[in-house]
Amino acid sequence: MIIIIASFLGTFGYNFITVLPLVARYVLQGDSVDLGFLTAALGLGAFLSALVIAGQRRATRSQLFVGGALFALLLGAVALSESFYLSMLFLFLTGVANIIFAATSNTSLQLATPDHLRGRVMALYMLLIAGSTPIGASLTGFMAEVLGVRVTIGLLAGACLVGVAVGFLYYVTHREEVEATAQVSAVVATVP
């Protein structure tokens, strides 16, 4: 379930290095200073979210799904926004949602994975989160040139939302297996 969502968000959503300059220049008609403020808004949201998430005692499935869905919806809101300040707000909230999903998925996956498989599973997770980003960035650049920046960001947001929906559908259809894995990992986590 986590791997499914991570693969969609990693490929289609985590392309901020490609997307933000395009938004600043071609959507908001800004310059490098505006790009700096947009990037700072995204980073500030991520930073504050990380502080809040770090203080929580456990990661929940609702955080996983809500974080992923909000990330996709806020990315879509960035695509629709023509206001610089509104775009900054949406990017701030996108940073918050990004860390909610990323921290929750990373923690949940590590806790649910048996010790002897953790390295392999986390390698696959990192491949999908970070390793698929260059593929998504190339796709984003091509689509932006052909379709335009706003349409491209909207399509990427839609693809992320599809990934969250597929992950949720997997959870619904495999609830017993997911719950059994969660129970085993909870018992393992409490053993000293």
Image: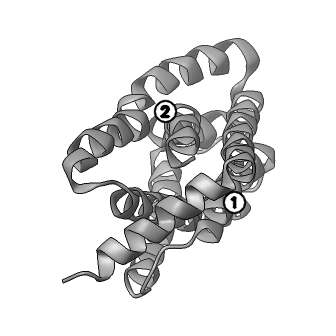
- Whole-percent x and y of residue 99? 47, 64
Mark 1 crowdedness (10 Å alpha carbons): few <14, some 14-19, many ≥20: many
Q: Secondary structure at mark 1?
A: helix
Identify the image quadrant of residue 178: bottom right
Name which quarter of the figure residue 94 lies in: bottom right
Q: In the picture shown, does residue 166 fall above or below 115? A: above
Give the side of residue 132 with respect to residue 96, left or right: left
Q: Amino acid at mark 1?
A: Leu
Marks 2 and 1: in contact by CB < 8 Å? no
In the image, residue 106 above or below residue 59: above
Marked residue nearer the N-terminal end (1 or 2): 2
Residue at 42% from the left image edge and 28% from the top image edge: 132
| Kind of residue at disc 2 | Thr
Q: Nearer the viewer, residue 56 or 142?
A: 56
Left or right of 67 on screen, residue 131: left
Taking the spot 50% from the left edge, 37% from the top edge, the residue there is: 15
| Residue 7 picture location, percent across and down | 52, 35
Instruction: Give me the residue at 32% from left, 42% from top.
Output: 121
- Mark 1, mark 2: which one is toward the viewer? 1
Q: Is residue 79 left or right of residue 106?
A: right
**Residue 18, label in figure:** 2
Mark on residue 11? none
Image label count: 2
Disc 1 versus disc 2: distance between alpha carbons?
20 Å
**Closest to the observer: 192 or 21?**
192
Classify the position of the C terminus by image quarter: bottom left
- Packing grade of label 2 (10 A; few <14, some 14-19, many >=20) is some
Circle 2 SS class: helix
Q: Which mark is residue 70?
A: 1
Q: Can residue 113 be seen by looking at this rendering?
A: yes
